């Protein structure tokens, strides 16, 4: 695993933990809703994909 892949993996896991932590602080009953859990994971994947695209654009320029 390269350093870049490790950073992206940390971003993915950290954003998932942040999302779940915020929900746990403000609306813990939402954690029993499957749609909310899927939304948090999807948001984390989207954020990581966006960071990957930005990183590749910076590398090519």
Image (spheres, grey):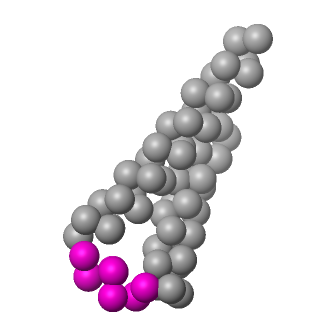
Left or right: 52, with 61 as reference point: left
Please state the horizontal and vertical placement of residue 36, each as a whole percent of the image: 32, 68
In this rendering, the answer to whether 22 lies above or below 7 is below
Note whether 49 is above or below 9 in the view shown.
Answer: above
Q: Nearer the viewer, residue 20 or 30?
A: 30
Indicate left or right for 57 with 52 as reference.
right
Q: Main secondary structure of the magenta part?
A: helix
| Residue occupying image coordinates x 44% and y 47% | 45
Seen in the picture, residue 13 relative to 24 is either above or below; the reply is above
Reply yes or no: does residue 32 show up in magenta: yes
In this picture, residue 55 sits left or right of residue 37: right
What residue is rendered at 43% in x and 85% in y? 27
The image quadrant that residue 41 belongs to is bottom left
Q: Quadrant of the C terminus?
A: top right
Examine the rendering and report whether any part of residue 1 can be seen. Answer: no
In the picture shown, does residue 51 fall above or below 39?
A: above
Q: Determine the residue located farthest toward the left in the rendered image.
A: 34
Instruction: Name the one closer to the observer, 39 or 8.
Output: 39
Find residue 12 and report its horizontal and vertical position in percent.
Answer: 52, 53
Examine the image and state in which quarter residue 18 appears: bottom right
In which quadrant of the rendered image does the N terminus lie?
A: top right
Q: Residue furthest front?
A: 27
- Furthest residue in direction top, as rendered: 61
- Residue at x-position 33% and y-position 80%: 31
Q: Position of residue 30 (x, y in %)?
A: 33, 80
- Camera sees residue 14: yes
Which residue is painted at 47% across and 78% down in the image? 23
Instruction: Inspect the magenta stretch and tell me whether residue 49 lies in it.
Output: no
* Span of residues in magenta: 27-33
Q: Position of residue 28 (x, y in %)?
A: 40, 88
Instruction: Give the tally of numbered discs.
Output: 0
């Amino acid at each position: 695993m390269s350093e870049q892949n490790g950073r992206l993996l940390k971003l993915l896991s950290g954003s998932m933990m942040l999302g779940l932590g915020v929900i746990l602080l403000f609306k813990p009953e939402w954690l029993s809703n499957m749609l909310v859990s899927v939304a948090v994971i999807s948001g984390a994947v989207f954020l990581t994909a966006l960071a990957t695209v930005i990183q590749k654009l910076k590398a090519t320029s």
